């Protein structure tokens, strides 16, 4: 399975979580992307990646006075990120 660079960036955003270790919601995913995007396009990519079993919806949380869906990587998604992360060579 091959992912585009934009799909890979989205997968890494979900995999890396927030700085405090909490799961990310849709608005945080959109804000973290390095390219201009919008909610419908990110939702399309998320549905595709859920279908490929790389990410999953894992519940909701109240943030900014709204209930938000949280996302996390599946075991397959975690392995995919590990496989596609360059390894550093220890000197």
Image (spheres, rainbow, N blue to C red):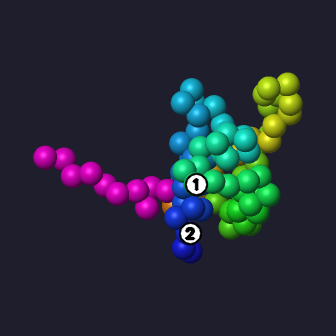
Magenta stretch, residue numbers: 81-91
Closer mark to the observer between disc 1 and disc 2: 1
Q: Secondary structure at mark 2?
A: loop
Q: Quadrant of residue 4?
A: bottom right
54 left or right of 82 in image: right
Q: Is residue 83 magenta?
A: yes
**Residue found 59% across the figure and 62% down from its top:** 7
Q: Quadrant of residue 67?
A: top right
The Cα–Cα distance between marks 1 and 2, rounded to whole angstroms, is: 16 Å
16 left or right of 82 in image: right
Q: Residue most toward the right?
A: 66
Q: Residue most toward the front?
A: 36
Image disc number at residue 35:
1
Q: Position of residue 6 (x, y in %)?
A: 57, 61
**Residue 82 visible here:** yes
**Residue found 13% across the figure and 46% down from its top:** 91
- Residue nearest the observer in this picture, 16 or 73: 16
Image disc number at residue 3:
2
């Amino acid at each position: 399975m091959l992912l585009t660079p934009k799909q890979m960036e989205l997968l890494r955003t979900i995999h890396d979580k927030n700085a405090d270790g909490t799961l990310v919601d849709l608005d945080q995913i959109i804000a973290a992307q390095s390219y201009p995007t919008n909610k419908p396009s990110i939702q399309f990519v998320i549905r595709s990646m859920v279908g490929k079993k790389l990410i999953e919806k894992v519940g909701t949380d109240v943030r900014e006075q709204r209930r938000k869906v949280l996302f996390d990587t599946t075991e397959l998604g975690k392995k995919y990120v590990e496989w596609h992360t360059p390894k550093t060579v220890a000197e």
